[in-house]
């Protein structure tokens, strides 16, 4: 039996992109607001001091310009005869020193630079310091991924247009230069070339030195584009011209790099952009229907089912299965439990998945318990140990809530712990090595969308050629393992980057053993 663990497919693990996690932005915003308040006070005190200085200086210049023209060139005899000898000037001199100068000195003293610096240090300690360089680069990489995946027009981005949404944010030339250089470092040739060429060709505000640096990077990119990516780019151009190839499953391999094909990545990005890849003949056979599944619970309010992809790799989109109140309560109850999302059996943080998640145990949250009951009713599957007294702990998985902020994504992956699974392999429990028992793998996935997303955030299935947009209260269900016990390698999928706003989902994975009598096996080895 040949099995490849999912965590082997996940490339080199990188630093956590913590700032992309939605809740991680809140303390950063609060920190900046507190620092801004300190700086505002400092600025107001400095402005008051400068005004006092200007007033004092204007009073002096009024005297000396009237008598000398220029204070620096005023002869001594003029000072003696015209200024000291004039009682009005004498009075004004003492007034300036006793009034204007005293006010100016007091205002300068009130600036209190050190006090402002001490307060800023206190704020920094309160929030465990300021963001670091690696965090800035992480945010930059996520923004670049958005630009690359969605092929955003550079002029639109500069004007704050993201995913056809006009925002009030704008991107400056210095921002664009930084992103162009960061894209170069990360071998994102197309995005880097767009940014750098814009700065060189347009009347940008960058310095001559920076423009020369940009031109040098463009020459490097041209070489890379010509040699390193020649075959890939030609392949992508051919696909866009002649049509996308669906269902391309690479052969089994011990090399994780071979688990994905060029078509997987090309199709994924096209689906994220909202392109239609599924053939018209297949689309024509898809249909919508109401279903109560023979369950009295669903008789009065049957499921609204939309077929996204037909058998044997069927995907169903269930509309309005959660109420607005249920989605709000789920999101609210999950926030305290959120941590950086991890992948694989070793639970590691990776650039492949940028977001936060939390598994909510049974009997901890009333809303989670109610949703678990609803899940069993609408699927006919067994997904909650609390509802199965005879079930064992690792035959089930807790409901997972996942949150993706701006740039948040989960690159191409399979949900099961093992891929290329065959019927003669059954996953076992792992918590107690001395008393292991069969649990089975993640046979099926049900994913709820808890909110609408302003732009981006689709769930894309590149080998099927379909994508589902986040729709609050809806859910998508599919099977990762077919009835014969084989992995369905066509169910490779990804969470597209969020362009604007936030995306929150709830995932329920159904294990094989707990559903032996809920989802029947096929009559033949290769039945689906």
Image: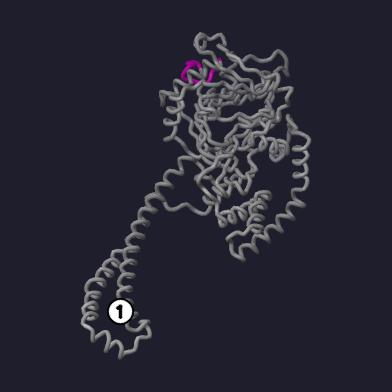
Residue that appears at 52% across and 51% down:
136
Where residue 341 sits in the image (x, y, percent)?
Answer: 53, 38
Which of the pair 401/201 is nearer the observer? 201
Which of the pair 211/24 is nearer the observer? 211
Dominant secondary structure (helix, strand or loop) of the stretch shown in magenta: loop
Vertical order, 344 against 517 (above or below): below
Where residue 24 sits in the image (x, y, percent)?
Answer: 46, 43
Vertical order, 4 against 205 (above or below): above
Q: Which residue position is annotated with label 1?
A: 63
Location of residue 435 by image quarter: top right
Vertical order, 411 against 187 (above or below): above
Location of residue 151 by image quarter: top right
> Which residues are drawn in magenta?
380-390
Taking the image as shown, residue 267 lies to the left or right of residue 473, namely: right
Secondary structure, mark 1, is: helix
Where residue 87 sits in the image (x, y, percent)?
Answer: 21, 82
Q: Quadrant of the N terminus?
A: top right
């Amino acid at each position: 039996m040949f099995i490849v663990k999912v965590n082997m497919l996940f490339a080199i693990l990188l630093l956590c992109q913590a700032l992309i996690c939605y809740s991680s932005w809140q303390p950063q915003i609060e920190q900046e607001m507190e620092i801004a308040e300190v700086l505002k006070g400092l600025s107001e005190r400095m402005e008051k001091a400068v005004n006092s200085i200007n007033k004092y200086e204007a009073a002096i210049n009024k005297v000396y310009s009237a008598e000398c023209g220029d204070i620096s060139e005023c002869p001594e005899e003029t000072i003696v005869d015209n200024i000291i000898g004039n009682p009005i000037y004498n009075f004004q001199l003492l007034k300036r020193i006793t009034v204007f100068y005293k006010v100016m000195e007091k205002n300068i003293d009130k600036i209190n630079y050190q006090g402002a610096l001490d307060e800023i240090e206190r704020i920094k300690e309160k929030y465990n310091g300021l963001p670091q360089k690696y965090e800035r680069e992480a945010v930059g990489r996520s923004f670049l991924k958005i630009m690359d995946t969605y092929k955003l027009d550079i002029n639109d981005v500069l004007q704050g247009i993201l995913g056809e949404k006009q925002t009030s944010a704008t991107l400056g030339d210095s921002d664009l230069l930084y992103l162009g250089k960061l894209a170069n470092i990360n071998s994102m040739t197309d995005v880097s070339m767009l940014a750098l060429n814009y700065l060189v060709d347009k009347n940008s505000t960058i310095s001559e030195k920076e423009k020369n640096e940009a031109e040098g990077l463009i020459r490097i990119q041209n070489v890379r584009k010509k040699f390193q990516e020649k075959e890939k780019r030609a392949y992508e151009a051919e696909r866009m011209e002649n049509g996308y190839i669906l269902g391309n499953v690479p052969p089994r391999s011990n090399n994780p790099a071979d688990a994905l094909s060029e078509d997987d990545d090309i199709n994924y990005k096209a689906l994220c952009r909202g392109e239609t890849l599924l053939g018209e003949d297949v689309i024509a056979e898809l249909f919508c229907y109401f279903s109560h599944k023979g369950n009295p619970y669903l008789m009065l309010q049957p499921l609204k089912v939309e077929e996204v992809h037909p058998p044997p790799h069927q995907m169903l989109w269930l509309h309005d299965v959660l109420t607005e109140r249920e989605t709000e309560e789920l999101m609210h109850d999950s926030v305290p439990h959120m941590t950086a999302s991890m992948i694989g059996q070793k639970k590691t943080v990776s650039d492949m998945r940028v977001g936060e998640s939390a598994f909510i145990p049974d009997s901890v949250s009333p809303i989670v318990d109610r949703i678990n009951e609803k899940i069993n009713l609408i699927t006919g599957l067994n997904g909650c140990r609390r509802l199965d007294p005879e079930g064992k702990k690792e035959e089930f998985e807790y409901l997972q809530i996942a949150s993706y902020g701006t740039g948040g994504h989960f690159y191409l992956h399979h949900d099961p712990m093992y891929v290329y699974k065959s019927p003669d392999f059954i996953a076992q429990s792992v918590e107690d090595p001395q008393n292991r028992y069969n649990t089975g793998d993640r046979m099926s996935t049900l994913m709820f969308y808890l909110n609408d997303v302003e732009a981006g955030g689709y769930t894309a299935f590149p080998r099927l050629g379909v994508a589902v947009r986040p729709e609050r209260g809806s859910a998508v269900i599919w099977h990762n393992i077919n009835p014969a016990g084989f992995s369905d390698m066509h169910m490779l999928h990804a969470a597209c980057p969020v362009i604007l706003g936030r995306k929150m989902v709830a995932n329920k994975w159904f294990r094989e053993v707990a559903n032996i009598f809920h989802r029947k096996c096929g009559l033949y080895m290769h039945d689906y």
